[in-house]
């Protein structure tokens, strides 16, 4: 859109100060990437990169949001959509740049923000998790592998009065997705790394290698360890081995049947050790996901892992007073000395829900399952640009918290007490941005 204004000198700029503000912040956000791209590709492709970023912000369609033909119509207008689509194809097909450039941008941002958090006496949290992009109708796209369908699992869940669903898991074609977000207690997250990989074919990758490379980079570039927060999918000896090898702290949700060693009780399964764990504190906590307020207890034990008997670890046992849910077991390398330390570990793990929201936003809001690109490298470039858009939205929430409510009130107004008291979702922010940019785009089309 900005390029359209440059070419058509007679078109007056939109009067929306909100759209101008968003474009200014987006230009400032993209400036480091643009400077790197200018050293690798033609400046016309760099301009296409910027307009593609703006078009992804503008188009809100889960099924077709990342189709090149759809994005092209919002770059140069509907009359010249085929030319813009070809321009996007040239950008993504260019062999002179790849998605690693955006990965390097995210990592530099992560380094700067970790330094800022440490200066503010806040503990940086790196939130890890895995998901998948499902392409159930695809057959011949490069890089497809078998992934377990979370949609099928949700749709076949037992519902009262309906048929019994299949018991075996359902697998469909798709891609694996590993993400890492940087955050801190009370802070909005930022993207540290987003990797899409496949377990088959020419571009076959092993998921554990992604963690190995990230930990190696962190050890080489950061003077101080950060806390890695991981879910039960990472509860294994190799996770602990690599965290200890690279000198990183970790908070890992542990499985109840895994073995741990206690100095007095010997080697037992985690849930058996936890039975004799003394409760050290109680607190009322709000479960935002289930919309419940729970009376939660916490206690901890000094333990060792059977494969690392010389490394002292701490098992934090989180219980529900009303037994609505089974206890939660958190294994950490951080020394737990007081109840306050234990509650910090509990809140740090609860903070991990932000990465679940990132996966949901990527699929439901940014349409990451909609691209129809044949080749693997081209798809990685497009998905990396979408990750840039998501990180830009997070930066707006993080850096301009007082501007966001005013912006939402003007461009995405809602009524009712629920919308006044609820936290602002990123979906509504993107809707407001799309509305503001759409007004500017419509004025451009009408003026032409």
Image (cartoon, rainbow, N blue to C red):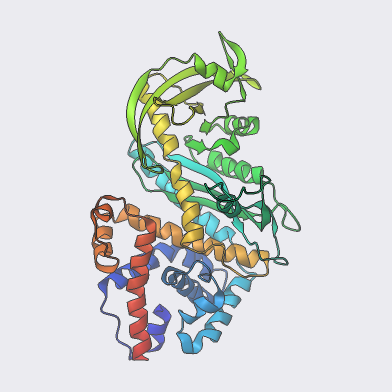
Q: Considering the image in quadrants, where does the C terminus appear?
A: bottom left
Image position of 405 with respect to 434: above or below: above
Image position of 43 with respect to 282: above or below: below
Q: Position of residue 47 (x, y in %)?
A: 48, 76
Image position of 433 with respect to 212: above or below: below
Does the rendering let one see residue 42?
Answer: no
Q: Position of residue 172 (x, y in %)?
A: 67, 56
Q: Residue furthest top?
A: 264
Q: Does residue 169 appear left or right of residue 281 in this picture? A: right
Q: Report the residue at 39% width, 68% height from top.
A: 27
Q: Nearer the viewer, residue 300 or 111?
A: 300
Does the rendering let one see residue 280?
Answer: yes
Q: Report the residue at 63% width, 32% height from top.
A: 236
Q: Considering the image in quadrants, where does the N terminus appear?
A: bottom left
Q: Position of residue 164 (x, y in %)?
A: 62, 47
Q: Does residue 20 appear left or right of residue 144 in this picture? A: left
Q: Position of residue 356 (x, y in %)?
A: 48, 48
Tell me which corner region of the image, top left, top right, bottom left or bottom right, holds residue 136.
bottom right
């Amino acid at each position: 859109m900005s390029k359209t204004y440059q070419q058509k000198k007679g078109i007056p700029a939109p009067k929306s100060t909100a759209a101008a503000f968003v474009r200014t912040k987006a230009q400032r956000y993209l400036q480091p990437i643009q400077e790197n791209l200018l050293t690798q590709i033609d400046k016309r492709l760099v301009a296409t990169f910027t307009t593609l970023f703006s078009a992804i912000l503008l188009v809100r369609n889960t099924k077709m949001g990342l189709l090149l033909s759809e994005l092209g119509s919002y770059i140069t207008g509907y009359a010249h959509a085929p030319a813009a689509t070809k321009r996007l194809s040239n950008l993504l097909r260019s062999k002179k740049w790849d998605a690693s450039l955006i990965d390097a941008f995210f990592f530099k941002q992560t380094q700067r923000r970790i330094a800022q958090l440490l200066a503010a006496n806040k503990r940086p949290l790196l939130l890890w998790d895995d998901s998948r992009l499902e392409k159930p109708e695809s057959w011949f796209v490069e890089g497809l592998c078998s992934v377990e369908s979370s949609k099928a699992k949700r749709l076949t869940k037992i519902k009262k009065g309906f048929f019994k669903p299949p018991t075996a898991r359902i697998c469909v074609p798709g891609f694996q997705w590993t993400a890492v977000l940087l955050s801190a207690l009370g802070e909005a997250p930022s993207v540290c790394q987003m990797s899409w990989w496949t377990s088959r074919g020419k571009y076959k990758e092993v998921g554990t290698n992604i963690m190995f490379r990230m930990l190696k980079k962190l050890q080489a570039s950061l003077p101080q360890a950060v806390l890695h927060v991981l879910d039960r999918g990472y509860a294994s000896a190799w996770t602990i081995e690599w965290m200890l090898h690279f000198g990183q702290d970790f908070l890992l949700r542990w499985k109840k049947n895994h073995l741990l060693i206690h100095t007095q009780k010997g080697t037992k399964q985690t849930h058996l050790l936890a039975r004799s764990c003394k409760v050290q504190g109680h607190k009322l906590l709000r479960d935002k996901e289930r919309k419940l307020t729970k009376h939660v207890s916490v206690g901890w034990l000094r333990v060792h892992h059977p494969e690392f008997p010389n490394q002292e670890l701490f098992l934090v046992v989180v219980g529900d007073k009303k037994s609505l849910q089974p206890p939660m077991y958190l294994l950490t390398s951080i020394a737990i000395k007081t109840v306050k330390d234990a509650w910090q570990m509990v809140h740090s793990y609860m903070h991990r829900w932000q990465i679940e929201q990132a996966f949901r936003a990527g699929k439901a809001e940014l349409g990451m399952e909609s691209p129809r690109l044949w080749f693997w490298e081209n798809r990685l470039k497009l998905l990396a640009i979408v990750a840039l858009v998501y990180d830009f939205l997070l930066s707006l929430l993080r850096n301009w918290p007082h501007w966001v409510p005013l912006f939402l009130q003007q461009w995405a107004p809602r009524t009712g007490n629920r919308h006044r008291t609820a936290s602002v979702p990123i979906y509504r922010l993107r809707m407001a941005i799309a509305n503001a940019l759409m007004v500017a785009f419509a004025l451009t089309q009408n003026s032409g």
